[in-house]
Amino acid sequence: MKVMNAAPSAELAQRMLREARIVARLEHPAIVPIHDVGQLPDGRVFYAMKYVQGRRLDRVVRNKNPLPELLRIFQRVCEAVAFAHAHGVIHRDLKPENIMVGPFGEVLVMDWGIAKVLLEPSKAEPIFQVSIATANTIEQQSLLSSLGERQLDSVAETAHGTVMGTPPYMAPEQALGETNELDERTDVYALGAILYFLLCGRPPLETLELTQVGQTFADQTRQALRQAYSKIPRSIEAVCLKAMARDRNHRYVNVDALASDVGRFLDNLPVSAYREGLSERAERWLARNHFLVFLIAAYLLMRIFLLLVSGR
């Protein structure tokens, strides 16, 4: 149950109701469902969610899980975020601490408190049209509707220059307070930063400045990756760097494209973010076809043995 700690205020109540409405609209297995919303006798707003069991993603990483297992968890996170984007919502605070992993690998993306609603005509139906239907009583319906659709939507937007999020996982445009520039690629950056965490075991940008631009930013991020773990495959490193590109136009165009490259890496296929050399292609082919190579080698050795024996 999420309850306001502070004394009741119209702004805090609006923000909590807005979060409840957003989560209620996003009906997905990897997004915690809202069961109830209401107001306590002292005026504080509350909402009740499904009870979640599991560990935060940052704690899962500390247990030294194999990289393929972590990347499959990452893919499920991408699925939830892509679903939210398809419904016109960006999260804006994606980080390992906001992702719960269940005992069977199930994933829940949590804390949509600073999510941004993208009111684009190409998106699905506006998020606030269905939230009243999720309320279970007339009192709750009245509470949800009393603030008004426009009033709740206005809470979603912050003034230019207002920074909301977690610094190590914030895209540069978000860190600089450019709220009008935020879109799906802002979450793509955060997912790239989570991928960095999965690869290195620590948050990105511990020593980098968010104001660094261009190739310097990419070079130093790559250097930080290499210092953290020198055995990171070049292809997944390139996926991480593309997702975390300083210029959002150089990032993956959407979360599905990022998840697709991660899936291709897991399947030992070339990724769009990295151009392989001839030796790397050969190495990858050998890795994919090692059993076939073993059979051919065994056959050749047997032929050589038979020739030697028959020659005697």
Image (cartoon, rainbow, N blue to C red):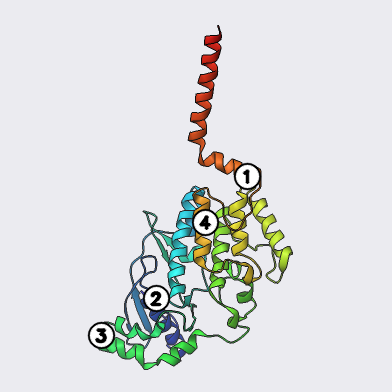
Determine which residue is flagged by label 4.
Answer: 262
Name the residue located 32 percent from the left edge and 84 percent from the top edge. Answer: 38
Evaluate if marks 2 and 1 touch, with contact meaning CB atoms under 8 Å apart. no
> In the image, is residue 133 above or below residue 299?
below
> In the image, is residue 58 above or below residue 67?
below
In front: label 3 or label 2: 2
x and y percent of residue 215 in the render?
A: 73, 64
> In the image, is residue 287 above or below residue 42?
above
Query: How many neighbours does mark 1 have within 10 angstroms: few (below 14), some (14-19), or many (20 or more)?
Result: some
Name the residue located 48 percent from the left edge and 53 percent from the top edge. Answer: 70
Mark 4 is on which residue type? Val
| Residue 280 numbered mark, or none | 1
Name the residue located 52 percent from the left edge and 63 percent from the top edge. Answer: 257
x and y percent of residue 74 in the render?
A: 48, 59
Q: Earlier in the sequence, mark 3 or mark 2?
A: 2
Residue 260 at least partly seen: yes
Element at label 4: helix
Name the residue located 37 percent from the left edge and 86 percent from the top edge. Answer: 129
x and y percent of residue 243 in the render?
A: 59, 64
Query: How many neighbours does mark 3 have within 10 angstroms: few (below 14), some (14-19), or many (20 or more)?
Result: some
x and y percent of residue 231 in the render?
A: 62, 46
Mark 1 is on which residue type? Glu
> In the image, is residue 295 above or below residue 221?
above
Element at label 3: loop
Q: From the viewer's perspective, tell me whether residue 309 is left or right of residue 211.
A: left
Observer-nearest residue: 110 or 261?
Answer: 261
| Residue 23 numbered mark, or none | 2
| Residue 237 numbered mark, or none | none
| Residues at marks 3 and 2, CA–CA distance in whole angstroms | 18 Å
Element at label 2: helix
